[in-house]
Amino acid sequence: MMPSPWPTIAACAVYAFFMKVIGPRLMENRQPYDLKKIMIFYNVFQILFNMYILLLVSVTLVYPSILNQVGHPQPIS
């Protein structure tokens, strides 16, 4: 925990000032960024990574219980 809330308050104030004042001034004469392909790649990556994590968790939690049901000894850890 921080000894004082002031650094957090200052960081929030700077962020809000940038979002409300500086950011719009910087972007007023620019075209918006085209992020469609990047977002599609990011979403596909997230889906695949979450499937991998689900596979790891499933194997870790389900496989030992299946081994116990068929009578195989559980490995010593």
Image (tube, grey):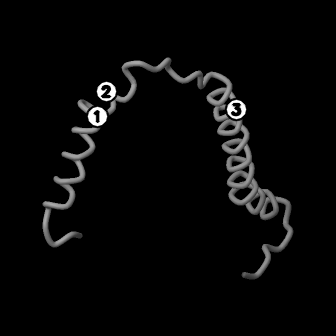
Tell whether 67 sits left or right of 7.
right
User: Is there CB contact under 8 Å for labels 1 and 2?
Assistant: yes
Mark before the other along the chain sequence, 3 or 1: 1
Mark 1: amino acid: Ile
Mark 2: amino acid: Arg
The residue where tag 1 is placed is: 22
Q: How far apart are marks 1 and 2 (CA)?
A: 5 Å
Quadrant location, the C terminus: bottom right
Residue at 13%, 67% in the rendered image: 4
Quadrant in which residue 34 is drawn: top right
* In the depicted structure, whether residue 68 falls above or below residue 42: below
Quadrant location, the N terminus: bottom left
Q: Is mark 1 on a helix, strand or loop?
A: helix
Look at discs 3 and 1 and give the one toward the viewer. 1
Q: Specify the label residue 41 is tagged with.
A: 3
10 Å crowding of disc 3: few (<14), some (14-19), many (20+): few
Q: Specify the label residue 8 is tagged with.
A: none
The residue where tag 2 is placed is: 25
Q: Distance between the residues labelled 3 and 1?
A: 30 Å
* In the depicted structure, whether residue 50 falls above or below residue 27: below
* In the depicted structure, whether residue 4 falls above or below residue 26: below
Look at discs 3 and 2 and give the one toward the viewer. 2
Residue 47 percent coordinates (x, y): 68, 36
